Structures are given as structure tokens and as C-alpha cells.
Image (cartoon, helix red, strand yellow):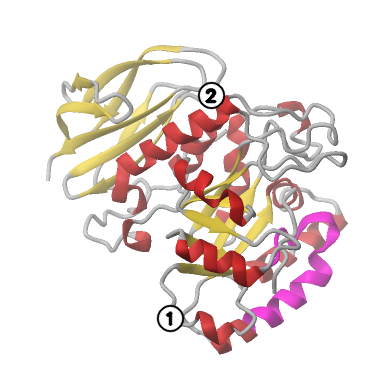
Amino acid sequence: MLLLPATSCAGPLPTAPAAQNETLFLDGFFPIGVFSQPVESFEKWKQRGIDTLLEVPMNHDPAAWDRAARAGGFRIIRRPAANPQDDIGRKDLLAWSHWDEPDAAGRAPTWTPAFERTYAEWRRIDPNRKIFLNFAGPDITWFTTRTDAYSREYATYYPRLVRTADWIASDIYPAGGWLNRSHESRRGDITLIAEPMRAIRKLTSKPQFVFIEASEIESGNVPGARCPTPAEMRAQIWYAILHGARGIFYFPASVRRDAFRFDAAPPEIVAEMVRQNALIRKAGRTLQGPSNPSGIQVSADGPLEVGWRLLDGQATVIVVNPTRSPVSNAKITINGATGEARFLSDDRRVAIANGVLRESVEPLGVRVLVVKVAG
């Protein structure tokens, strides 16, 4: 569950056509964001590697929040300004955002028509402004896969909602959040991150963004909810990117009924966040290229999962072990790769022979590596 803002286990997604010279999404900028944080915390979040702020917190001054975000050099996603005309032409404003989770708590029948009206009005005001929409991950995965009459009817609202936005996000929190009945037995399973992405991909090819849990969130409200471990959070981040996420947004709040906190991320989670944000930046612009382009093919021994990007003769390969068991001496095949692979986390170099390298990967382990490929 996300907060209402205040102002108006399968493989990766399918292979894309080869398009090395295609314009990169957002010109190669990969948003690393945080959800609904107060002005006084902005510098702290910048130090953690955050470059994008999403949504004004409830009961906070939208204009003051926006001024502080601009002064801090952040990119912004939020509701339109009080006078939406003031937003026209702003480059730091990545998108206008709909209200959060229109599909949660049975809201879709009433919120969908409202979103359609809002979309038409926003398009009239600024035809070029991107519009952002976030789905409740447990809900979209539930209603789009059930066969009962109510679920089938509820699922009809999703295509309508998708049409009201340019960018689509999803939130599902395997460790700390509410899970639907089909997911309850999978508490902590990081592969849940990709299930809403797959449901959305069946509806649209629009760019997707993913929320990442960074606190205990629903602990005390939902049985079994807990803070993710650093390894779980790290694996969720790269599993989302592996599956095509065009940006990530951390959710660090604790929404306990007795003690709400904007930032409940413990020190070990903060430290891991800083490390992974730096690694994302090190991977750089390539992450915004086409997902799994056919210019190369990459595979790995199970249960490892792989995804890749290709830019200017260099492939960035993401390998995730989504399981709780180590994988020893796994074979990773990168067709067309030459020379050696360089692992971005530690600059370790491993020779590639006939497109193959060997690597052992710890439980929930992540590897991000770059290789040169034949032109």
C-alpha cells in the first residue's frame, strides 16, 4: 500500500529487436527515486544517491516542496501545479502523476472515469507532458489472473486506466507489504517484483517503473510483514531492471497505524541503497537501451536469470540468483562476446572463452558485468 499524495518466476521480458543506435529512453537518464518525502529530508536523500522525487507528502505545501526540489537539483514527478500552465516547458518535471493506486481497495470503478477526465484535461493543457500512473501490484496480479465474475469485471478497468498514462509503475513489497492470497505463502520471494510487470506487459508496451521496499512498511498491520534484508532489496532492484524497469522508486516509510514514519530504512538498508545506487550509475546510460536486444543472446545455468542491454559495441549483462541457494560454477553464455568480462561492483575481470564464462553466485546474488561484443 502506498500513501495518498496531497496535491491536485519466469524469464525476463521478451527480446527486443536489435536497435543499438536507437534513442535511449530519457536520453539515458535512469531515475533513482524516493516516494513522498518531506523537504527537510531532501539533502539526506541526495547523499543516498537519490536523483528523483515522487509526490508531495500529505499536508505539505506543494509550492514550497516544489521549490525545494528544484533548488536541490532533483527530477520531479508530482501532481500539476496549482496553475498547471506554470509547469509547461519544465525539463526537471519528468511527469505529472495521477493519484496513487487507483486499483486498490475496490476503487477502480469510481476512479477510472475520474482518471479519464483528468487525462483529457491534462492533455488539453500540455500535450507534451508525460503522465505517470502507479498500480497496486498485489491487485493487478490478482484481478488479471482470476476467473470469477467479479475479478473478470474488475480487470476490465485496467486497459482503461493504462490509456490514461504514458508511464506505468507497480508496487509490490515481498517482505514488508500486504500480499494477496495467492502470494501470502511467498513472503520474501523477490521474484514477486516481476509479476505486476508481466501483467502490465500484457496490456501495454509503455515504459514501466518499479517501487522497491526499503523498510518494514506494514509490520504491525499485516501478519508476517518485515523489513527486507539488504540482500533481498539488492536482488529486487536488479530483478526489476533485468525485467525492463526504466527507473526505480524506493518506499522507505513505515505505515504502522500506531507510529507512521516517512523514513524507516534501517542503517544496513541505507548502506545497501547507497551501494546499489552507485552501481546503477556506474552501469550508466546503457540501462535505458532496449531490453534484451537481439544483437546478442545471453543465457545462464538455472536458476540464474539474465537480462542485457547493448550500446556502442558493449553489452551490459545482469545476472540474478533469485533463490536462497548458492549456484556454483554456473555457465554464463554471451554469444559474440570477446576478451573478458568486467564486473562493475568490484572491477574484477574474468576471461571469456568462446562466449562463455564461469561464475559462482551466492543466494540472492547479483552480478552486473560489461563485455565487448563483435560488431
Residue 199 visible at all: no
Residue 266 x, y percent position in the rendering: 62, 29
For this rendering, which residue is in front, 45 or 32?
45
Question: Residue 305: within the magenta?
Answer: no
Residue 272 is tagged as none
Q: Is residue 260 left or right of residue 68?
A: right
Q: Which residue is mark 2?
A: 231
Residue 37 x, y percent position in the rendering: 63, 52
Q: Residues under labels 2 and 1: Cα distance?
A: 40 Å
For this rendering, which residue is in front, 235 or 327?
235
Q: Which residue is mark 1?
A: 89
Question: Residue 117: within the magenta?
Answer: yes
SS at mark 1? loop
For this rendering, which residue is in front, 48 or 312?
48
Say few, some or many: other residues with alpha carbon within 10 Å of mark 1 (under 14 / 14 to 19 / 20 or more). Answer: few
Q: Is residue 168 above or below residue 302?
A: below
Q: Is residue 210 left or right of residue 173?
A: left
Q: Amino acid at mark 1?
A: Gly
SS at mark 2? helix
Segment colored magenta? 98-120
* Residue furthest front in the image: 40
Residue 276 x, y percent position in the rendering: 43, 34
Say few, some or many: other residues with alpha carbon within 10 Å of mark 2 (under 14 / 14 to 19 / 20 or more). Answer: some
Mark in the foreground, 2 or 1: 1
Residue 281 x, y percent position in the rendering: 35, 43
Helix, strand or loop for the magenta stretch, by majority: helix
Q: Is residue 60 left or right of residue 15?
A: right
Lower position in the chain sequence, tag 2 or tag 1: 1
Q: Residue at x 47, y 47 (%)?
A: 46
Q: Is residue 359 above or below residue 126?
A: above
Q: Is residue 356 left or right of residue 281?
A: left
Q: Amino acid at mark 2?
A: Ala
